[in-house]
Amino acid sequence: MFEGGANPMEADDYMDQVETHLTSMDVTDDHVKIILATYKFSKDAKLWWKSVTNQYKVEDMSWQMFKELFYEKYFLVTKRLELRDQFNGLIQGNMSVTEYKNKFTSLSRFVPEMMSNEVNKTWNFISGLHYQMRPLITAQYLKVYSKAVEKALILEGEAKDINAGNEQ
């Protein structure tokens, strides 16, 4: 169900779930996609959709136009730009590698052009790693994201072992 409301992440999650379901069901007709996507609308979202159907000829609406109207209403451009800026400024800091990777993955959907290929994705991940870890991974010139994550996790584990040894 999607009720609408003020949380843009819920709107984005809803749209992501809908698109996943539509793909798995092999739905290609835009009108059918829109019917299925709006079927689970309630409260504010249902009222909004009713107003859209009064303004537009929904039968001829493209899926892309539906998504644009949906995001215009529930996921404002300013919020998307804010999340893009969060991604651009993302650094590991005190986060574990796993926490950093999860945050990186969560925010990366707002910068698809920066994730367009494996090398860019990997470089963006490495560039936000802790300053002590970054040169050790950069020196290996890793081009595959999963390998960079794996190396970062290994280095983090080794650092913990060293710190534990120093404490003893």
Image (tube, rainbow, N blue to C red):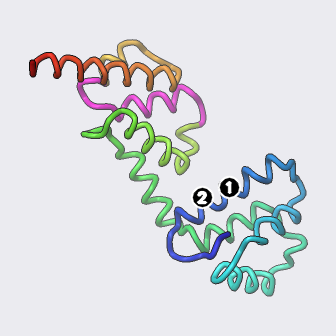
Residue 136: which quarter of the image? top left
Q: Identify residue type, mark 1.
A: Gln
Classify 70 as above or below 160: below
Q: Check disc 2 and give the amino acid type.
A: Asp
- Write down the region rendered in magenta: 116-133
Q: Which mark is residue 17?
A: 1
Name, please, the residue furthest toward the front.
168
* Tags 1 and 2 touching, CB below 8 Å: yes
109 on left or right of 149: right
Q: Relative to the observer, which residue lies in front, 88 or 152?
A: 152
Q: Secondary structure at mark 2?
A: helix
Circle 2: is it few (<14), some (14-19), or many (20+) Cα within 10 Å? Answer: few
The location of residue 72, given as percent across then percent down, is: 61, 71
Query: Which of 134/18 is in front?
Result: 18
Q: Is residue 146 magenta?
A: no
Residue 145 position, x and y percent, is 51, 26
In the picture provided, is 32 more to the left or to the right than 130? right
User: How far is mark 1 from mark 2, CA to CA?
Assistant: 6 Å
Given residues 6 and 56, the one toward you in this image is 6
Image quadrant in which the N terminus is located: bottom right
Q: Could you tell whether 57 is left or right of 103 in the image? A: right
Is 131 covered by the magenta stretch? yes
Q: Label 1's element? A: helix
Residue beneath the point at 24% across and 21% down: 159
- Report whether 102 appears left or right of 76: left
**Most distant residue in the top direction:** 140
Residue denoted by label 2: 13
**The C terminus, quarter of image:** top left
How packed is label 1: few (under 14 Cα within 10 Å), some, or many (20 or more)?
few
Q: Which mark is residue 56?
A: none
Task: Report the residue at 42% width, 47% height from top.
Answer: 87
Q: Position of residue 74 (x, y in %)?
A: 58, 71
